[in-house]
Amino acid sequence: METMYIFYDGKIVPENEVHISVRCKGFNYGLGCFEGIRAYWDEPGKQLYGFRMQEHYERLLQSCKTLYIPIPYTADELCRATAELLRKNQCRSTTYIRPLAFKGSNQIAPTLLDDDNRLVIYCQPMGNFAGKDELRVAVTSWERLSDNMLPPRTKPTAAYLNSGLASLEVVRRGYDEALFLTRSGHVCEGPGENVFMVRKGKLVTPPPSDNILEGITRDTVMTLAREELGMEVVERSITRTELYAAEEVFFSGTAMEVVAVVEVDDRTIGSGHQGPVCRQLKELFFQVATAKLKKYAGFCYPVY
Ligand code: PMP
């Protein structure tokens, strides 16, 4: 693979010049937090657009604050640094961007109280993440983390062990993706995506108080459903069997984008295929992400 450039410690450098110690606390204790951002390539306009980068970096800064990993940049500076990185790598296809803030310190003590805070940003081309348009999902036996364990509103690296265990469990059983419940048994989210259902014509999704990540794609989907499809959108707790009774279920997330869930726990959802609401929202999402709808031009950060 050709050498990629990454952003590290305020500079853009070749990835193979960066060496991180095996003793680093980010590696040893999971003392880090991250973001996942996509930049969408628009072929007709020959332009790459960072999707809602400002919001992603605001969420990163919020994660950093919660985990005491201060980094010396504003969201605006991080957007500019990311655009520079994408240009340096000559990215001309849809790209996934991974900013990761972590404790670089090498002392063997799990305290967060030191000031060796690092930020790395790397990127790679990314197409359809799920590799399919219709997913078979199962509820995992692993419970979603709660706000007093590892705050789901942030993206701590360590929280993704919970995600990983859930995915591994259901993928080994032959499903495409897992679905978490909360301790109180409410539908929560997938390991890396938010969940929606269409029930009696309304679009319903769990509220932040059910320990979800407040997804940026989720927010985009809710906006598009209200503004463009004229749908009523409700944030409320969902029980597991309500999903079985839904007309449609789908996931939203930066990597996953908008993708239909056609089976939950071996129960067929709706027609057993991607439904009309999911299809329309997916189409709208791609139009917005590639700056085709002027109304949402503010979501798109031109790189070139
Ligand atoms: N939930 C979790 C646990 C996630 O990791 C993600 C991906 N960041 C999401 C939901 C979706 O959030 P977003 O749309 O901001 O990517």
Image (tube, rainbow, N blue to C red):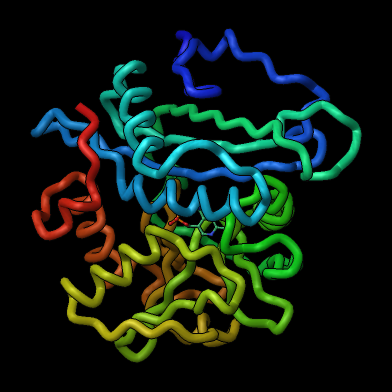
Camera-side residue of 215 and 242: 215
Q: Residue furthest bottom?
A: 200
Vertically, is 57 above or below 239?
A: above
Specify whether 203 is left or right of 152: left
- Which residue sits at x=60%, y=43%? 70
Vertically, is 207 above or below 179?
A: below
Can you tell which quarter of the image residue 85 is in?
Answer: top left
Instruction: Tell me where residue 31 appears, x and y as whole percent.
Output: 73, 42
Specify whether 259 is left or right of 147: left
Can you tell which quarter of the image residue 277 is in?
Answer: bottom left
Q: How many marks?
A: 0
- Which residue sits at x=75%, y=42%? 30
Vertically, is 240 above or below 34?
A: below
Specify whether 200 is left or right of 68: left
Camera-side residue of 3 and 304: 304
**Picture quarter with the C terminus:** top left
Instruction: Tell me where residue 185 appears, x and y as whole percent.
Output: 68, 82
Task: Answer whether residue 1 is visible to the viewer in this image.
Answer: no
Task: Answer whether residue 287 is visible to the viewer in this image.
Answer: yes
- Which residue sits at x=36%, y=58%? 258
Specify whether 184 is left or right of 259: right
- Which residue sits at x=18%, y=74%? 227
Camera-side residue of 197 and 246: 197
